[in-house]
Structure formats: C-alpha cells, structure tokens
Image (tube, rainbow, N blue to C red):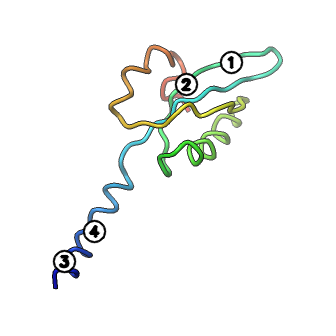
Amino acid sequence: MIRAVLATLLLIALPAVASAQCYADYKAKRDAPLRLHYGVAEVDGQCAPGPAAQELAPRLARQGWELLDVVGVFGPEGLEERRADAGDFFLRF
C-alpha cells in the first residue's frame, strides 16, 4: 500500500520537476565580418550543457550565428546577475 502511494506521488511530482525553468549562458560567433556575442537563453529540454547545446545550436543557426560554447546552465535565480553581460542577447534566442 505504501509503495503504491509513493509511486503515485512520484508520478505526480515528475512533470513539475521536468517543467522547472532552465536557462543557459552561451558564446556564439558570426563570420564575415567576425562578430562574437555572449547570451542567455531559456532551454526547454534537459537542463544540462550537452542537451542545451543541441537545442541552442539550430536556434542560433537560423539567425546566422554559430554556437561556440554553452558556458553553463542554471535556474531563474541566476538570470538577473547575467542580464547586463548578455545585453541585447538576454533571452533573445
């Protein structure tokens, strides 16, 4: 009985954990002429650098940017401290 209740609670809690907000800060470039930028983007998938890079690369490529690196991933608590550094690229992609 206790196992059934725990399993039910776990199934209820999983979507809430999966939908937690996740953000990535990244570096990107554009050639001819060379331009570099640092940005912050919301990530919908798994909150880890590898999956974030897979999600961000096509988004950036559609606008002519090449993803160089995902610096890190973080929750909403890290947004404000990165806003000024990201400038125009804060939550743009």
Q: In terms of sequence position, does the residue under pointer 3 or pointer 2 come before the other?
A: 3
Q: Secondary structure at mark 3?
A: helix
Labelled disc at residue 5: 3
| Residue assigned mark 1 | 36
In three-dimensional space, the C-alpha distance between marks 4 and 1, rounded to whole angstroms, equals 44 Å
54 shown above or below 8: above
Disc sitting over residue 39 in the figure: 2
Q: Which residue lies most toward the front here?
A: 2
Q: Position of residue 76 (x, y in %)?
A: 35, 34
Residue 3 on image: x %, y %: 22, 80
Please tell me which of labels 3 and 4 falls first in the chain.
3
Give me the disc on residue 10: 4
Which residue is at the far left?
Answer: 1
Badge 4 density bin: few <14, some 14–19, many ≥20, Cα 10 Å: few
Query: Which of the 4 image quarters holds residue 12?
Result: bottom left
How packed mark 3 is, by other alpha carbons closer than 10 Å (few <14, some 14-19, many 20 or more), is: few
- Amino acid identity at mark 2: Gly
| Residue drawn where x is 58% and y is 21% of the image | 38
Q: CA distance from mark 3 to mark 4?
A: 9 Å
Q: Residue at x 34, y 55 (%)?
A: 17
The residue at the far right in this view is 32
Say what amino acid the circle numbered 3 marks.
Val
**The C terminus: image quadrant:** top right
